[in-house]
Image (cartoon, rainbow, N blue to C red):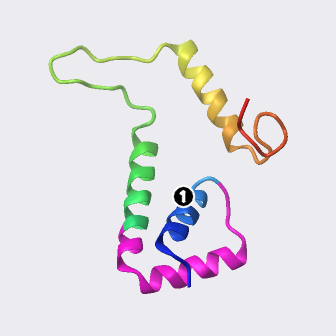
């Protein structure tokens, strides 16, 4: 039986890349049996969707003017995120370290 820690790792991993069939089935079985992990999975999905929906909005702080990200910094961040999403990673070996 999969532990909650292993399930949490798989749930986090599946946000970035598809899981293999064996891992998907093991996670699905664990989620059917574990209410805590089901709750955690819903929280992860909520956070992911919230971040996606707010990614292009301006940042607002009460009492301050609207803050904007410098276009050069924004492009650099987006470029790095695209590299991280690629299957091979930025240095071509599946790792993201420098």
Magenta stretch contains residue 31: yes
Q: Is residue 58 above or below residue 64?
A: below
Residue 84: name its quadrant.
top right
Q: Which residues are magenta?
A: 17-39
Q: Is residue 44 above or below residue 92?
A: below
Q: Residue at x 67, y 43 (%)?
A: 85
Residue 77: name its quadrant.
top right
Residue 21 on image: x %, y % = 71, 77
Camera-side residue: 16 or 53?
A: 16
Quarter holding the N terminus is bottom right
Q: Residue at x 79, y 46 (%)?
A: 94
Magenta stretch contains residue 84: no
**Label 1 crowd (10 A; few <14 / some 14-19 / many >=20):** some
Q: Which residue is mark 1?
A: 12
**The residue tagged with tag 1: helix, strand or loop?**
helix
Query: Is 29 placed left or right of 23 in the picture?
Result: left
Secondary structure that dominates the magenta span: helix
Residue 28 on image: x %, y % = 54, 80
Q: Residue at x 20, y 15 (%)?
A: 64
Query: Is 88 placed left or right of 36 in the picture?
Result: right
Residue 35 on image: x %, y % = 36, 79
Quarter holding the C terminus is top right
Q: Is residue 89 above or below residue 31?
A: above
């Amino acid at each position: 039986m999969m532990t909650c820690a292993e399930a949490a790792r798989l749930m986090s991993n599946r946000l970035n890349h598809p899981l293999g069939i064996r891992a998907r089935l093991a996670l699905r079985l664990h989620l059917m049996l574990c209410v805590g992990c089901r709750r955690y999975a819903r929280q992860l999905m909520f956070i992911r969707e919230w971040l996606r929906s707010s990614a292009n909005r301006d940042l607002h702080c009460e009492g301050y003017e609207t803050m904007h990200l410098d276009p050069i910094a924004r492009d650099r961040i987006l470029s790095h995120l695209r590299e991280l999403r690629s299957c091979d990673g930025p240095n071509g070996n599946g790792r993201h370290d420098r």
